Image: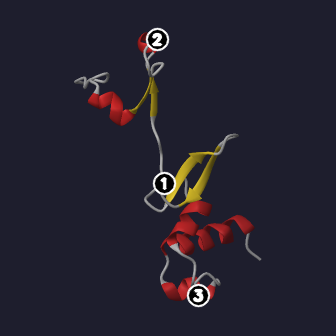
Amino acid sequence: MAPLGILTAIVGAIRVGGPSWLKALIGRARENRATVELELMSSTSHEVCELWNGQGVVRTMGKPEIQEIIYVESLKDTDTFGLYTLEDAWKDNILEKQRM
């Protein structure tokens, strides 16, 4: 009898980077990399992302379409009410690059 934590760590290591015959041995031969990353790892990649669902940050598979919006308080009385997309803010020279 082995401690469950050790078995869990071994199975997790096989799922993340083990050879296909070991994955078949633990019943995970057809599992894709995104599922393993979503369930076991804290990283994000082109297959897994983190999104705000209105209540909290959730991890999900895929690449979402994201709209970045900037609020500029000094321009709140203009036609845009101070709201700009990131692309429009660059075009209108509202944003500027700073050297570090």
Name the colouring of the figure. secondary structure
Tell me the kind of residue under disc 2.
Asp
Number of the label disc, if any, that sits on residue 67 = none
Task: Give the spatial CA distance, label 3 vs label 2.
Answer: 63 Å
Number of the label disc, if any, that sits on residue 77 = 2
The image shows residue 24, relative to residue 42, as above or below, that is below
**Residue picked out by circle 3:** 24
Q: Under tag 3, what secondary structure? A: helix
Tally of marks: 3
Q: Estimate the x, y position of residue 23 in percent, counting from the top left.
A: 56, 82
Number of the label disc, if any, that sits on residue 44 = 1
Q: Report the side of 95 relative to 8 (left or right).
A: left
Residue located 46% across and 11% down the image: 77
Pick whichever of labels 2 and 1 is earlier in the sequence. 1
Q: Report the side of 77 relative to 54 (left or right).
A: left
Pick whichever of labels 3 and 1 is earlier in the sequence. 3
User: Dots 3 and 1: beta carbons under 8 Å?
Assistant: no
Quarter of the view holding residue 35: bottom right
Task: Give the spatial CA distance, label 2 vs label 1.
Answer: 39 Å
Tell me the kind of residue under disc 3.
Ala
Labels 3, 1: front one: 1
Q: Under tag 2, what secondary structure? A: loop
Pick whichever of labels 3 and 2 is earlier in the sequence. 3
Q: Estimate the x, y position of residue 82 in percent, counting from the top left.
A: 45, 19
Q: Under tag 1, what secondary structure? A: loop
Tell me the kind of residue under disc 1.
Thr
User: Dots 2 and 1: beta carbons under 8 Å?
Assistant: no
Quarter of the view holding residue 27: bottom right
Q: Report the side of 19 relative to 24 (left or right).
A: left
